[in-house]
Image: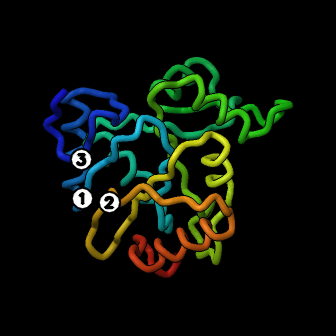
Amino acid sequence: MKYDNPHISASTPRMGNAVTRGIGSIMMKIIGWKITGQFPEEKKMIVIGAPHTSNWDFILAMSAMLSVGLHFSWMMKKEAFFWPLGPLWKKMGGIPIDRKSKTNLIEQMVAYFETHDNVWVGLTPEGTRKKVETLKKGYLRMAYAAKVPIYIIGINGPTKEVVLDKVWDLTYDTDIDNRKIKAYFDKNFTGIKPENG
């Protein structure tokens, strides 16, 4: 199947229509940002975006998603999925997480990947907008357990680009992978508020 958007692939989970893509594109133009690169041919993966330095990151991510018609999944506590918002959160990509369940977060996400054919789960590995020396390692444990790749998306404030970068070559050593990924983000990308990155 051929797509007219240069950023997506045949495996990109899709949502929305021409209207929502138009809204997203207008929002990107208003804030002065652009998307560069191409999504990979992966049906299941964990997408990590960094540096996460500003509240504007959320608006930027939502605008970028809308502009390319990407269906991006994200985790949220199950208590937030009450009517009438619950169906909306799910439609937008929300994954209800039961923090009181006997199965932990990693097991719940492994089950989610196993029961979905085409899903990309997005995470901000810093876990905060403040400067951190190391990334939280949950994204790696999740990728290892679910046997899915990790894809890098960089936020580059100076050039106002959302960079669709690369599938990371995992070693399956948590400390090595986490250290190298953090160093890669630090070397190649600068957040909207550099003082926080």
Q: Residue at x 48, y 77 (%)?
A: 186
Marks 1 and 3, the one that precedes in the sequence: 3
Q: Local crowd at mark 2 within 10 Å, few (<14), some, or many (≥20)?
A: many
Percent x, y of residue 184: 47, 73
Q: Residue at x 38, y 58 (%)?
A: 166
Marks 2 and 1, the one that precedes in the sequence: 1
Q: Is 109 on the left or on the right of 124, as rendered?
A: right
Percent x, y of residue 163: 32, 61
Circle 1: residue type: Thr
Task: Report the front residue among 120 and 53.
Answer: 120
Q: Residue at x 48, y 32 (%)?
A: 93
CA gap, disc 2 to disc 1? 6 Å
Label of residue 7 in the image: 3
Circle 3: residue type: His
Percent x, y of residue 105: 73, 40
Q: Is residue 98 above or below residue 106?
A: above
Q: Residue at x 34, y 37 (%)?
A: 70
Q: Is 47 on the left or on the right of 79, as rendered?
A: left
* Residue that carries the numbered disc 1 in the rendered image: 36
* Residue that carries the numbered disc 2 in the rendered image: 162
Task: Report the front residue among 67 and 79.
Answer: 67
Q: Are marks 2 and 1 in contact (CB under 8 Å)?
A: yes
